[in-house]
């Protein structure tokens, strides 16, 4: 099928320019100012709208298998496509965890039948599964995920001899959740003794999962990566001091140590616990406005390389519990591009930088084949964003299976009208094409 997208403003590779795009099957066939519509099946006139590469979210938790009450690959990929995310990497802390080749292949099978977006899965490292890591086909997975803190099941990796070995043998990036569990557990113990479990409030979360717990862990893993000359990517930075550990001295393709920041750490600070409570309880925690501002600075100056969501839904009832009983995490994939566009309107970041951090850089960092850019011959992963259309996030338009968002009540000033996934018009003005699934992401080995 040939689809002509006319009269849009393409945001791509540090430029904004008016052009048409011809999509032929799965690929972008032509990019030009005036493309004839004489031999096409469908024309989309998006005059004045922005055309972006599809968002690549390098960190999501879609909860399948194991937690269908919270989310499924189908439900969350559907929400992601509505939010302009065309490709995602899902995390290994499901049930069973993705720590064997068998469990990895099981997830691929589920996604092939139910994911509206393109997909791949991080493989989980443990203290015991090095032999499974050695079997991994490097062109099928983006990275090895290590939980240095905040783990589930057997996924806490606290044997640094194992971590060193993983750096030495892995042909794909080692990606980490970096917090020091010993510091956190000691902090929690002290707060329980001082206040009692019933009286610990959400605003204490930033002191329990503290800046020092993040910094100590991140310093340690960076030191080990340098020792082994390993390829390290640190997920969801949350502190001013951590941001100082990363540099912008090399192009991304030549960086050995890279980092990510998440939408919630850019959008909230610890003052917001008073109104949002447990609904902004994440690990790592949201911290001070000073940390928030430092993360923005590091992002703008390319010390932080990627913006992601860490989409991690829990049910409303689970989040609406006492602090000590409430799980950490929240849903974000449907609204990440919208929130970043609001940050653009508030002059915190340029459109070109949003596309660089959410589209280009994940593709470069993880060596993804033919995605992340608007280029002839690349997969047609595209998002059309109409400007100056206002609406409010509320329960009537939330698509997450959990049914809530930390951004409920927020006014949005744009509208995603179309999302193409590998050439398939998967979403058009609120209507999904669910006959064609997303594709398994491939990586250059």
Image (spheres, rainbow, N blue to C red):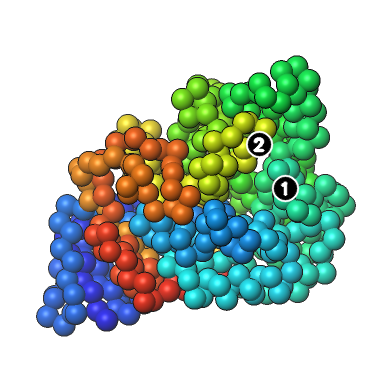
Residue 196 visible to an observer of this rendering = yes
Determine whether, in the image, residue 254 is placed left or right of residue 25: right
Residue 32 vs residue 383: left or right? left
| 29 displayed left or right of 276 | left
- The quadrant in which residue 405 appears is top left
The C terminus lies in quadrant:
bottom right
Decide if residue 62 is in sight here: no
Q: Is residue 55 above or below residue 41?
A: above
Q: Quick one: 224 or 437, which is closer to the camera?
A: 437
Q: Residue furthest top?
A: 194
**Residue 217: x, y in percent?**
74, 38
| Residue underneath mark 2 | 325
List x then y, in percent, for residue 308.
50, 48
- Mark 2 or 1: in front is 2
Q: Quadrant of the N terminus?
A: bottom left
What residue is rendered at 55% in x and 72% in y?
110
| SS label for mark 2 | helix
Between 261 and 393, the residue placed more toward the observer is 393
If you read the primary sequence from the N terminus, does the residue marked by circle 2 or circle 1 appear first?
1
The residue tagged 1 is: 151
Q: Could you tell me which residue is drawn at 48 percent across and 29 percent down? A: 276
| Residue at position x 73%, y 21% in the image | 196
Residue at 68% over, 61% down: 95
Q: Residues within 10 Å of mark 1 (few under 14, many from 20)?
A: some
The front one of 435 and 165 is 435
Residue 410: x, y in percent?
34, 35
Q: Is residue 346 left or right of residue 437?
A: left
Residue 12: name its quadrant. bottom left
Element carrying mark 1: loop
């Amino acid at each position: 099928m040939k689809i002509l997208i006319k009269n849009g403003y393409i945001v791509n590779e540090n430029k904004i320019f008016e052009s048409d795009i011809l999509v032929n099957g799965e690929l972008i066939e032509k990019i030009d100012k005036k493309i004839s519509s004489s031999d096409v099946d469908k024309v989309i006139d998006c005059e004045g709208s922005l055309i972006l590469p599809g968002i690549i979210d390098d960190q999501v938790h879609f909860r399948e298998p194991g937690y269908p009450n919270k989310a499924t690959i189908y439900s969350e990929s559907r929400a992601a496509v509505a939010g302009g995310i065309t490709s995602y990497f899902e995390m290994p802390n499901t049930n069973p965890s993705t720590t064997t080749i068998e469990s990895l292949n099981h997830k691929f099978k589920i996604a092939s039948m139910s994911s509206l977006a393109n997909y791949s899965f991080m493989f989980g490292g443990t203290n015991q599964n090095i032999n499974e890591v050695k079997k991994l086909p490097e062109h099928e997975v983006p990275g090895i995920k290590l939980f240095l803190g905040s783990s589930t099941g057997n996924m806490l990796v606290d044997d640094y001899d194992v971590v060193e070995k993983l750096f030495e043998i892995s042909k794909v990036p080692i990606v980490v959740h970096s917090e020091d569990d010993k510091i956190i557990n000691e902090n929690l113990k002290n707060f329980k003794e001082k206040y009692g479990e019933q009286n610990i409030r959400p605003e204490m979360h930033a002191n329990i999962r503290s800046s020092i717990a993040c910094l100590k862990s991140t310093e340690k893993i960076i030191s080990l990566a340098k020792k082994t000359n390993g390829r390290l990517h640190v997920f969801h930075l949350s502190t001013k001091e951590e941001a100082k550990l990363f540099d912008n001295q090399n192009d991304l393709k030549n960086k050995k140590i890279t980092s990510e920041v998440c939408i919630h750490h850019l959008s909230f600070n610890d003052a917001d616990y008073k109104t949002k409570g447990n609904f902004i309880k994440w690990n790592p925690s949201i911290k001070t406005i000073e940390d928030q501002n430092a993360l923005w600075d590091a992002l703008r100056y390319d010390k932080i390389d990627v913006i992601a969501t860490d989409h991690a839904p829990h049910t409303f009832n689970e989040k609406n519990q006492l602090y000590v009983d409430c799980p950490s995490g929240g849903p974000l994939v449907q609204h990440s591009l919208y929130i970043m566009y609001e940050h653009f309107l508030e002059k915190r970041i340029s459109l070109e930088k949003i596309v660089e951090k959410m589209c280009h850089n994940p593709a470069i960092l993880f060596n993804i084949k033919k995605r992340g850019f608007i280029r002839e011959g690349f997969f047609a992963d595209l998002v059309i964003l109409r400007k100056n259309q206002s609406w409010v996030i509320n329960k009537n338009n939330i698509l997450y299976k959990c049914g809530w968002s930390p951004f409920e009540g927020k006014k949005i000033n744009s509208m995603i009208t179309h999302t193409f996934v590998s050439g398939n018009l998967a979403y058009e003005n609120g209507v999904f094409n669910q006959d064609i699934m997303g594709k398994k992401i491939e990586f250059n080995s």
